[in-house]
Amino acid sequence: MTEVITQTPPILTGAPSDKERKYDRQLRLWAASGQAALESSHILLVNSGTGTVGIETLKNLVLPGIGKFTIADDAIVRDSDLGVNFFLDEDGLGKSRAQHCTELLVELNPEVQGDWFPKNGEPLSLPDVLGNEGPYTAVLYALPVHPRCELLLQEYCNQNKTPLIAVHSTGFYADFKITFPGPFPVVETHPDVTATTDLRLLSPWDELIDFARGMTKDIDSLDNHEHGHLPFVVILLHYLDVWKATHNSAYPSTYAEKVAFRKMVSEAARTDNPEGGEENFDEAVAAVLKTVSPPSLPGDVKEVFAYEHDSPIRSSFWIIADAVKEFYEKHGCLPLPGGLPDMKAQSSVYIQLQNIYKRKARRDAAEVFESVRRASGGDAIDPAEVDLFCKNAAFVKLINPKNNDPERLLEVADEELANDEMAKEGIMPPSLFPIYLALRATAYTPSVETSFPEDILKDMMTLVPQLGDQEPYAHERYEQAAQEVIRGASGELHNVSAVMGGMVAQEMIKIITKQYIPINNTCIFDGIGSRCQVLRL
Amino acid sequence: MSDVTMAEATSAYTPESTRVDETKRWTYVDNIRTNPGPFSDPIAGTQEAIEQFDKIKVLGAGGLGCEILKNLAMSKFRDIHVIDMDTIDVSNLNRQFLFRKDDVGKFKAEVAAAFVMRRVKGVDITPHNCRIQDFDAEFYKQFQFVICGLDSIEARRWINAMLVSIAEEGEDADSLIPMIDGGTEGFKGQARVIVPTITSCIECQLDMHAPRAAVPLCTIASIPRQPEHCIEWAHVIAWDQEKPFPQLDKDDPEHITWLYQKALSRAQEFKIEGVTYSLTQGVVKNIIPAIASTNAIISGACCNEAFKLATSAAPPLGIEDNYMMYSGNDSIYTYTFKHEKKPDCPVCGQLSRPLQVNPRMTLQDLVDSLAVRPEAQLKKPSIRAESKTLYMQFPPSLEEQTRANLDKTLLDLGLEDGQNVVVTDPAYPLEFNFSLQFKKEV
Ligand SMILES: [Zn+2]
């Protein structure tokens, strides 16, 4: 009777899966939720021209693992493609460019599917690609295209509520424009962590008050170790009480008062200890100007609260936004996010304080959740979504596109021309609007090889008649942009398209994951000055 | 969509004509090279400029290597060297697009060079599977540019110092080897052009990359509050006490698991939430998030500068603006500006850099502070003052002789306000001159 003792191998609890290991560096940016959104997306690229910028964009989407891409492109591979597009080689010469690019792109990530049209030498039917192969999460097309093709894409995206992106890269210049199908709200904007501290020092609740008073009622008789480990939140709450007692129960509110308050805190630090000072008091002093202020409503959140959204189908975002607005109107502040920055303190004290903030945040979120439940359509909303919203409440952002406003281009032109009056003095960099306009003027021209700068300048002036009235200096900049666009003869420079492909992919990732803040709505890249400008057009 | 359709294509190409016409192939690059634009240098498009371009030899290095090699090859650079000591890890595959799962463990430089040469016929890429520090000035002098996408600030500072010293010793313009440097972190990055001795250098710009504040040892040892504190405890204290494996290998999942479990039990003891395997790995390896799109933007911007420098087709960054910052977290924002050269730069300046010190601090405190001060960032500094050696890290015999000085204060050591000290560090091939500025006693 021998007992077999089997040694169980140590289980690697929590160790990442193969996929988590491969995507580790990006999961740290958009987490599993963002990754899942990417993996269920399907991107359509309608390619044209020298065909590189769209392919570079897809490369940057295939690598992080979108679900699927489809390329619609009826060009065949020519020698000149091999000098600009890395995802082609001589085996593809004379064959479908869409197919060959697809084959070389799917190699990058076995988890991504790729498809292409047209097949078998048939002519490309864009309506079929749009109607039969979707739905698409986003549609990207490369300029120049035929206006008829652009119209088809616009109609599809409008009907299906799909974001549409147009990109144009030629020579050293490039731009892209995102057309959102409607208001685009973002909850997970990922603000800088230092910006998210919200301690409510001027509106403490009972539990926090009791905790702070409990620690500071005999503050002067604490021994040096205890005194030197009071969390700075507790220190500030204590001295705010002291301040109020001598200032008609009012908190320090003006800058001068805050400076005086800061001096009060600073003088309360003990200096007769071996270190000659106290780190926790240093932290308290440093935090005064930032944290001793009443809660305020950030402009972006005001915009969300003010946005008219009476459409019959209300998304969960708007139901929660309404509930948060109700909370704000009732309490005069947003739900508490509940985070506590690190600060010098004993472990157990810090954890208690952290839990006080967490519990309050949970109570606030529960209150919001209650009113979400009462709203029509609110019964299906996941409490986790409400929690996420409450945690990010001060940083939610609404991209509010005002599409198809014909006056907008002229408005922007005026603003940018005014900007250049100041740029002339060297106060600010010159506007990139001339580049935008030169690209726009050639967006439907298959090749500018035979065009002259004067032709393009004339088209630019048709778009923006004000150009005719400009002084020679301003005028010259538009002329130069036209010359530069001609110079490339509608060919791409690989580097510029690589930059643009990175930016377009990054914006598409933000849109698909609904994390971070996408541009609203046009980005211009100047490869000569090495800079970008974003305009809302 | 293109003007050539599939039907035309079948007639245009017969199977045997699949050799590439090199002239047609480079149509677009050559358009730009041969047709000067309104912003081009007068030399652009001349026979001289064209011939010069064809002789250019360029060096690429670091984590942006895949992008850089692709971009250089597609810009018609023909003679490229690449240095990278690293081997391919599975976590590279989300962005380093020349590598596949089967390549894991192979040398990056070798695999990347072979891939690009296979794809772009006619380009010659020489891989070096080693550290940039393994080469001397003679090696670096053969290049017209160096493009770095290095992930360590230490390696950047080293190559910067090398190129500045080549420029200082050289007699002609050929010894000015511009360095184009790119770096990324998440959705952010920067691209900059350094013309050694002429423009601000990496060392001048050091304070733009201040190291993260370290957690005090007493917090780690006795009052942890954050999951990171528990992980640091497992990493620096528990590992040393228990030595579960002879040497910590941060890439070995078994070692990371050991640290993770140690950190987790410490966190439970202190009721701290948030210790995960992923966080453990992130803290121990100091992982910086990295994505394909940002790498594409920054590498594209760097190689665009190289192309402009090499062809004069448009003014490059350098003499005027020399630094482009990119941020994609919130919309897209770039800031392109001129970072000024610093006269007290220890590499390219003439003056010694002031160092604020408390005269009552010990030499040990000074040595420790050099690692974290943004203007120094020296981890293994040896210090001497004019004729007197204060502390030497190497060799061991000198270390032993000078160790006693560590406990003495600056005053005890006879140092004075305004005194110059020379600091060396094995990571860099140069001396750093500092002048001590005594803080006034309050
Ligand atoms: Zn310098």
Image (spheres, coloured by chain):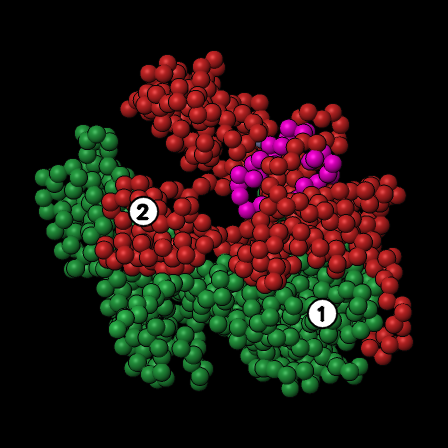
Residue at x-position 75% and y-position 58%: B118
Q: Chain of mark 1?
A: A
Q: Quadrant of ligand 1?
A: top right
User: Residue B150: within the magenta?
Assistant: yes
Residue at x-position 34% and y-position 72%: A384
Pointer 1 residue: A101
Magenta stretch in the rendered image:
B139-167
Quadrant containing the N terminus of chain A is bottom left
Under mark 2, the amino acid is Glu
Is A406 situated left or right of A186 in this image?
Answer: right
Q: CA distance from mark 2 to mark 1?
A: 54 Å
Quadrant containing the C terminus of chain A is bottom right
Above or below — where is A117 with respect to A282? below
Which of the pair A478/B84 is nearer the observer? B84
User: Residue A293: within the magenta?
Assistant: no
Residue B407 falls in image quadrant: top left
Indicate the colour of chain A: green
Residue at x-position 51% and y-position 23%: B433
